[in-house]
Amino acid sequence: MITQEHPKSVIVIFGATGDLAKRKLFPSIYRLVQNEKIGKEFAVVGVGRRPWTNDEFRNNVSDSIQSSLKESKDLNDFTSHFYYHPFDVTNPSSYLELNDLLGQLDGTYQTEGNRIFYLAMAPEFFGTIAQNLKKQGLTETNGWSRLVIEKPFGHDLPSAEQLNQEIREAFNENQIYRIDHYLGKEMVQNIEVIRFANAMFEPLWNNRYISNIQVTSSEVLGVEDRGRYYENSGALRDMVQNHLLQMVALLAMEPPIKLTTDEIRSEKVKVFRALRSISEDEVKNYFVRGQYTSGKLGDKELIGYREENNVDNESQTETFVAGKLLIDNFRWAGVPFYIRTGKRMAAKSTKIVVQFKDIPMNLYYKKGETVPPNLLVINIQPDEGITLQLNVKKDGDAGDSMPVKLDLTNDFLDGINTPEAYEKLLYDCMRGDATNFTHWDEVALSWSFVDPISEAWKKGKAELATYPAGSMGPKEADEMLEKDGNQWWPVN
Ligand SMILES: NC(=O)C1=CN([C@@H]2O[C@H](COP(=O)(O)OP(=O)(O)OC[C@H]3O[C@@H](n4cnc5c(N)ncnc54)[C@H](OP(=O)(O)O)[C@@H]3O)[C@@H](O)[C@H]2O)C=CC1
Ligand SMILES: O=C1O[C@H](COP(=O)(O)O)[C@@H](O)[C@H](O)[C@H]1O
């Protein structure tokens, strides 16, 4: 059941001394309190191995908030709800002491026995933690207990199945919240509303009127200090298996009969089932992988991926992926969904471009010229909003037209006040709303789609292209669309 307001809970963060907790989780909890989404009935217990005291932990939380948010007030009051409990999560007996602390905090903060266990740690610990929580009795409370799991959920389908089995021995599916932070982004959540609340789009949202859909998520950052993780992951597992496929599912799904978690998830699952699987030998025709070499962004000289920390100097890991997806159902037969993502690209931008089919006859452009297509652009980040590219009469020339953009960016959204994705997802989890978390079926189907691609690459069945850091990816990604008579639309 979904709680309507002011959910109460103790939140245990495993990995509370790590990067994700500091950059995303603490500021999100702070904003939930400041925005009065949660009241005083909450406590946070941080777990890590570092021998910090409560005070050291609280100082770290304060620093994180001051460095991530423009304004911070009442920090002492806020951090007084935070407790640190150091232990190695592989040590079963330590969970008993943690349970005692949770019992005390339940009483002090009147959290009604509700517990969130947030696993902000490397995935190899997920199964162990879940099982220890169950075995040592931490899930037996008067209230509810929920498990939030960070990505990546496994490395491929077999490892994801194994992990799922371990977790399911301790928690039911309805207690498990697999986070995909893209599903918490305002404009990703807006995809459904734009599609299903506007009479003008839904009738056109099919293969009769849409030529192709492009989903780009480009990053300016390189791998930073995550080389060790990224070498085993690459862009396919890091971004495509989760964030990009989730956006494709939201764009392609049928209208759910109700806005409930189960109905929405079941429509997304149907999209994953209709995704045309690609055999290892076909991968080179549908996917391009690339790796950045040294380059320049503005005045800044950038090193190549192989020179980054903890990266093999002969690494074959892809830092860029572009792909062409086909969805074999009545609505989408014949419409390519092009996706691309990469690190060290020219711009930080997540954008969806829906390109409509050409008009049947060109009355307005000169012979040989084509009328620019109508484009619906959903800007997910850094700007949020939508633009619609239409053709209008060219000034003073009755027989000519030109494209203009109907820009709804500033009119309805103020990016500064838009809640962080993690803030929304944490709040959803506290309220028991799992709609914007991924169900196991979605995870399993997306691995089934991705596994032959990574297998083909591992076996060298497709070239690893290169691109200079600071560019929009390898030329092979442009050629993939050119073969279909299409082109990538600019992201900025
Ligand atoms: N950082 C990011 O931007 C994103 C991260 N993620 C995911 O979030 C998770 C965490 O990532 P991130 O914060 O970057 O990782 P970090 O390496 O920064 O943090 C790892 C955390 O795990 C703790 N830890 C490691 N081993 C143990 C152990 N045996 N017992 C107890 N604590 C332990 C560390 O504590 P200590 O050192 O004190 O032992 C530390 O708090 C990963 O699954 C990652 O894939 C997902 C999306 C984005
Ligand atoms: O999950 C991940 O996402 C980030 C990009 O997230 P965004 O919200 O900044 O678009 C990516 O940098 C990271 O490698 C990946 O693990």
Image (tube, rainbow, N blue to C red):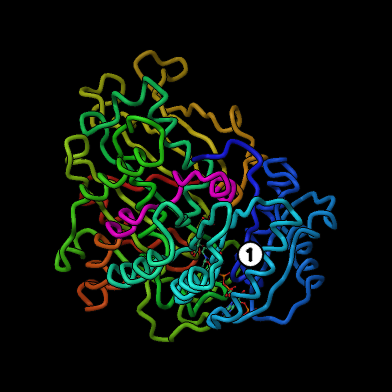
Q: Which residues are magenta?
A: 425-446
Residue 46 screen position, x and y as percent? 67, 68
- Mark 1: give few (<14), some (14-19) or many (20+) Cα within 10 Å: many
- Up-down relation of residue 109 to residue 59 (above or below): above
Secondary structure character of the magenta stretch overall: helix
Q: Is residue 230 in the magenta section? A: no
- Relative horizontal placement of residue 401, taking residue 295 as reference (left or right): left
Query: Is residue 190 at least partly visible in the picture?
Result: yes
Q: Quadrant of residue 293?
A: bottom left
Q: Which residue is at 37% across, 20% downward?
A: 199
Query: Is residue 369 at least partly visible in the picture?
Result: no
Q: Residue furthest bottom?
A: 313
Nearer to the camera, 51 or 107: 107
Q: Which residue is mark 1?
A: 21
Nearer to the camera, 84 or 337: 84
Q: Is mark 1 within 8 Å of ligand 1?
A: yes
Q: Is residue 433 in the magenta section? A: yes
Nearer to the camera, 410 or 60: 60
Residue 409 screen position, x and y as percent? 56, 33
Q: Which residue is at 62% across, 63% downward?
A: 12
- Up-down relation of residue 316 to residue 351 (above or below): below
Q: Quadrant of residue 263?
A: top left
For the residue labelled by badge 1, is the local secondary structure a helix, a strand or a loop?
helix
Residue 271 screen position, x and y as percent? 26, 45
Nearer to the camera, 192 or 205: 192
Amino acid carrying mark 1 in the image? Ala
Q: Which residue is at 21% across, 65% downward?
A: 284
